[in-house]
């Protein structure tokens, strides 16, 4: 990333501008894809796409325009040309914005870094012709976006991401368990999808792990762990400034 978003909040314009930073990024599939609409990935389905596959005997229902006249003339029997069909791949994001994501000790809140990662990957996907969808979980609510083309998907999705990131959790918020989000994602996803799970995984449970395993049976699942350095090693006792992006205070960790 050539530029990292900072602070406790994020703007829609900043997420839109990340489109200019996707040069060199790729979401190349590591397995064959089973989606059913036109796009840029070769599937296991044999159909009428652009990449030649083989010649076979003509079968009822084959299009006459795909007859291979040379092979037909040579063998005396009608043959048709088959192609690997190019189909697009749905790309899905699960963005988990539980209370623990609204924290950061260095450049930005984990929620902001997560929004940046989602935006970069989403722009990369739509620039490649993929359909993009998402499930956003924040403040005990879910926002679902079924996979759609660039014109229909990316701007409303990023608008909601910015709103969710900027709506800091209330004092009573306990967060939406990752389990509930994964249950919804199972219903939203279709076989052959590329799925990014973006979270600090603080609420990861055994049942949630089983749901992730189920998702991975027919999809490519990528986990993006968002963590802060202070979560790995506590800083030495001292007086530290703290802010929620709106108010400022001091935190004293030295013994009194």
Image: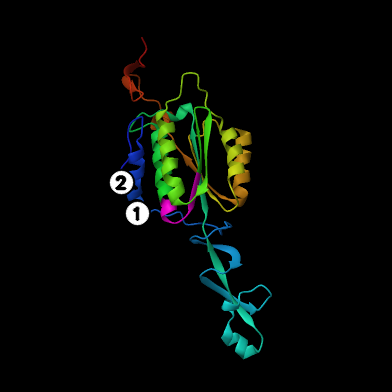
In percent of width and height, residue 46 lies at: 60, 67
Q: Which mark is residue 167?
A: none
Name which of mark 2 and mark 1 comes first in the sequence.
2
Q: Which residue is mark 1?
A: 23
Q: Residue at x 55, y 66 (%)?
A: 85
Q: Position of residue 241 (x, y in %)?
A: 31, 21
| Residue at the image position 36 percent from the left and 41 percent from the top | 15
**Where does label 2 land, which residue?**
2
Mark 2 burial class by Cα count in 10 Å: few <14, some 14-19, many 20+: few
Horizontal and vertical percent position of residue 189: 58, 46
Taking 159 as reference, is 96 left or right? right
Tell me if residue 128 is in the magenta stretch.
yes
Q: From the viewer's side, name the closer residue of 34 and 216.
A: 34
Instruction: Tell me the colour scheme of the image.
Output: rainbow
Q: Which residues are magenta?
A: 124-133
User: Dot 1: what SS?
Assistant: loop
Q: Residues within 10 Å of mark 1 (few under 14, many from 20)?
A: few
Which residue: 51% across, 70% down? Answer: 50
Figure check: 105 above or below 14: above
Q: Image height check: is 8 above or below 53?
A: above
Horizontal and vertical percent position of residue 30: 52, 57
Q: Is residue 56 above or below residue 125?
A: below
- Which element type, helix, strand or loop, lies under badge 2? loop
Disc 2 versus disc 1: nearer the observer: 1
| Residue nearest the observer in this picture, 94 or 50 | 50
Q: Please give the name of the residue rendered at 43% of the width and 50% of the height, measured from the top-left corner.
A: 151
Label 2 – label 1 distance at C-alpha: 10 Å
């Amino acid at each position: 990333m050539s530029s990292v978003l900072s602070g406790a909040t994020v703007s829609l314009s900043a997420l839109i501008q990340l489109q200019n930073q996707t040069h060199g990024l790729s979401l190349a599939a590591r397995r064959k894809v089973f989606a059913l609409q036109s796009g840029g990935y070769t599937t296991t389905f044999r159909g009428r796409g652009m990449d030649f596959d083989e010649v076979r005997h003509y079968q009822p229902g084959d299009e006459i325009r795909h007859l291979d006249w040379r092979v037909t003339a040579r063998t005396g029997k009608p043959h048709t040309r088959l192609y690997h069909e190019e189909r697009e791949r749905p790309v899905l994001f699960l963005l988990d914005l539980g209370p623990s994501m609204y924290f950061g000790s260095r450049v930005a809140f984990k929620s902001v870094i997560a929004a940046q990662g989602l935006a970069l990957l989403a722009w990369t996907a739509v620039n490649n012709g993929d359909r993009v969808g998402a499930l956003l979980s924040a403040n005990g609510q879910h926002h679902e976006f079924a996979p759609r083309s660039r014109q229909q998907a990316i701007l409303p999705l990023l608008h909601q991401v910015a709103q969710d990131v900027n709506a800091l959790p209330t004092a009573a918020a306990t967060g939406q368990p990752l389990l509930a989000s994964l249950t919804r994602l199972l219903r939203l996803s279709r076989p052959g999808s590329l799925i990014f799970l973006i979270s600090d995984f603080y609420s990861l449970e055994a049942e949630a792990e089983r749901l992730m395993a189920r998702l991975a049976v027919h999809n490519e699942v990528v986990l993006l762990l968002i963590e802060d350095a202070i979560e790995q090693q506590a800083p030495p006792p001292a007086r530290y400034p703290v802010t929620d992006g709106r108010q400022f205070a001091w935190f004293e960790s030295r013994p009194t």
